[in-house]
Image: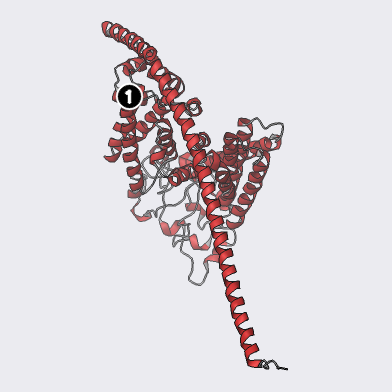
Amino acid sequence: MSTAPPISADRVQKFIEDLEAQKKIVSKCTELFTTLTNHFTSLQNSLSQKSQSLDAKFLSLSSKFSQTLDSLSQRESSLPDRESAAAAHIETLKEAAFAEFKDPKGSAQLSDTLKSLARRMDSAGLVKFIVSKRKESVPLRAEISVALSEAVDPHRLVLEAFEDFVSQKSGKTLGLTDKRWACGMLVHALFPESSWKEKKGKGPEFSRNIGERAAEVVDRWKGQLDGEKEGLTPGEAVMFLHMVVGFELKERFDEGFLRKLVLDFSSRRDMAKLAAALGFDDKMGDIIDELVKNGKEIEAVYFARAAGLTERFPPVSLLKSYQQNSKKNATTILKNGNFSAAATEESKNVELNSIKAIIKCVEDHKLESEFSTDLLRKRATQLEKVKSDRKKSSAAAGKPQNKRSHSAGSARGSGPPAFRHTKAAKFSNVYPPFNRRNPAPSAQQSPAARFSAQYNYVGQNVFEAPTAPYASAYGVTHSQSPAAVTQQHYVHPVENLGVSSFPTSGAYGGQTSYVAYDYGSAAPSVFQPSSSTQ
């Protein structure tokens, strides 16, 4: 009977270690296979999504391509009609021009002059005439639109006016403000607000050459504005954006630059509609949020109404928030100014302006049923009355109290009052010697002690009664008796007293200062005016 050889423990241990190593290899291979499988699956899903996206874009492009072809075919088919309409229009303009040339006197009416300049395509003359009729801006605004329709190429006419304005702006020519206003009138008449929404989906109404010229003008204009230290004015900013919208030049500018213009000049009433015309519809919510953060709730109401976001930004809530912030600002101004007169006036002006803005916003958006303005109107009336009374009181305080207290040949408030020679001749000695009229006080007596009690003239028998003009100028009632004068009280500040015991400065009947009179040089019998009154 044979016996099996014994199995050693080392061999078993080695076998187990081999199994463990193979197990780790199999586990690592499984892990790698899982990673590769997930990676290839992700690639397949990504490729599938991109393929679907490309298919959708291809379908959209095909749809746009077919729509563009249809539009081009329609425009091509409409060319004969448009050509005949343009020819008829040109023929009408030609007949009107011939009729105008046959009648050299012409018509002096506003509309006829504008139409004549538009027919001649005289952009410089048109701008000059609009500037000359600036006081008639209300009828002028309506007549410009009619006059531009008489021009052969209205877009070129307005563009030439802007080219002239931009070229003169670089040279800093005088009268740019009036020309800027005239160009703004032209661009508003050429591209009215009603046409901004109608432009979407339609081709331009001007030629490609005009569009390229407009782009060059606006680019040059923007370069000038970037170089100016003071920056844009609100009117010029609106006019710039109006040109961008009208000539469809948004793609030539950075969106951040246009958005900054909209935010910086959001107080302009037409800026909200311009922002919508610039294609900021999807970003209007962010613009309104930024306006609210900057304390421009009134502007936010206009933007929300223009963008149709009144449910997200309720106008009444914005108005109440603006009213509360205005009250806080007015209170802060008062506290920072220590409730001074200037701070009080500024605070009332801030409150009045905010009330007017709220009332105007409520009227523009027909919110009277949701936001009552009765108390605001009463408060505005009170502030207006206070402002009017303050102006009247300040004007009255600035007027002189005594017109006879100064002579015609001297400055107001300086020099002694003028006396009439005829009345001065009645007295034998108008100005007695200085030491007899007003003797100097002793050195031991203080000025305060001298003028704290009733003042009595020394030597009443030598004091001559003053004439009526002299007495009225110094506030003393005329009397032939010297005793009447001695009973008056003369109390003056010590620092205003000179050696002559009379005030060197102060107010006598509205006078502010007096020049010292040389009594020693006065004639004994007849008064002679001193050099200070000449």
| Vertical order, 129 against 461 (above or below) | above
Tag count in the figure? 1
Across and down, in percent, residue 218 comes to 35, 37
Across and down, in percent, residue 289 comes to 59, 47
Query: What kind of colouring is applied to the model shown?
Result: secondary structure
* Residue 32 visible here: yes
User: Is 118 displayed left or right of 304 in the figure?
Assistant: left
Residue 384, image quadrant: top right
Residue at 54% from the left image edge and 64% from the top image edge: 450
Across and down, in percent, residue 483 comes to 57, 50
User: Is 326 displayed left or right of 442 in the figure?
Assistant: right
* Residue 189 visible here: no
**Where does the N terminus fall, quadrant-wise?**
bottom right
Q: Amino acid at mark 1?
A: Leu
Secondary structure beneath disc 1? helix
Q: Give the residue number, with chain letter if any, for mark 1.
A: 157
Residue at 38% from the left image edge and 28% from the top image edge: 182
| Foreground of the two, 511 or 90 | 90
Residue found at the far front of this picture: 1
**Where does the C terminus fall, quadrant-wise?**
top left
| Foreground of the two, 175 or 248 | 248
Across and down, in percent, residue 253 comes to 40, 42
Residue 167, image quadrant: top left
| Vertical order, 83 against 58 (above or below) | above
| Vertical order, 131 against 332 (above or below) | above
| Foreground of the two, 77 or 9 | 9
| Foreground of the two, 289 or 514 | 289
